[in-house]
Amino acid sequence: MVAGLGSTWWQYVLLFLAVAASWSGVPVIGTAALGAAAVAGSQHKLDPAAVIVVAVLAGEVGGLGGYAIGRRWGQRLLDRPGKHQASREKMMERGERLYARWGFLAVFVTPAIVSGTANMPPYRFAFWNLLDSLGWSVAVAASAYGVGRLATGHHAAHDIAILVIGLAAGVLVAVTAVRRHRRRRTQRLGPIASESSREG
């Protein structure tokens, strides 16, 4: 992987900055940057393994940065008057509802700054954000790499396997989230149903 850096190190730096900024809450296209880097990897212009490692680390660093901002200044930013105050409050309310319904899985679908503002325990956020970053990086990079190989017609069986792995990773994350949500909902509604039956 080190040998793959070579004179292209600056492209990895740009990838890191784009992904980290995206995960910290800055509106940049981290997914597009990772997809482009993975396609470049499929054309042997970048090291695919290095692309994934850089993206995972960037997602974790960016997520922790957004979390720190939310934990330190989140409430102050919410209370700050201005034309975007209403939209900020709606975003936070939506995030709080997701945390109430989904628990830690809300990390996968809410901005890191919301996790910080909601005072999610830092070590728990760091762990789940890392898993989120890993799953996202593998899903996007492997899918883009496989598509890039197929598009050029220079693909082999292992290239198709990589594409399948990427798609499967994305499906796995979604299925796991849905199952966890349903389990939490059942556990939450169970005592309510028992109480209702006793009252009846």
Image: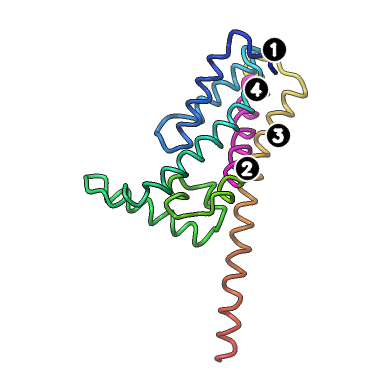
Mark 4 or mark 3, whichever is nearer to me? 4
Sequence-wise first label, 1 or 3: 1
Q: Where is residue 4 in the image (x, y as percent from the top left)?
A: 67, 13
Residue at numbered disc 4:
50
The quadrant of the image that shows the C terminus is bottom right
Q: Where is residue 102 in the image (x, y as percent from the top left)?
A: 54, 58
Position above or below: 135 against 155:
below
Name which residue type carries label 4: Ala
**Looking at the image, which residue is at 70% across and 18% down?**
1
Mark 1 or mark 3, whichever is nearer to me? 1
Tell me the number on the disc at residue 21: none
Q: Marks 4 and 3, Cα distance to the nearest angstrom?
A: 17 Å
Residue at numbered disc 2:
131
Q: Where is residue 171 in the image (x, y as percent from the top left)?
A: 64, 43
Name which residue type carries label 1: Ala
Name which residue type carries label 2: Leu
Residue at numbered disc 1:
3
Asked whether disc 4 touches disc 3, contact meaning CB atoms under 8 Å apart, the reply is: no
Label 3: few (<14), some (14–19) or many (≥20) C-alpha neighbours in 10 Å: some
Image mark count = 4
Magenta-span inclusion, residue 137: yes
Sequence-wise first label, 2 or 3: 2
Asked whether disc 1 touches disc 2, contact meaning CB atoms under 8 Å apart, the reply is: no
Residue at numbered disc 3:
165
Left or right: residue 136 versus residue 158 is left
Q: Marks 2 and 3, Cα distance to the nearest angstrom?
A: 16 Å
Name which residue type carries label 3: Ile
Position above or below: 175 against 184:
above
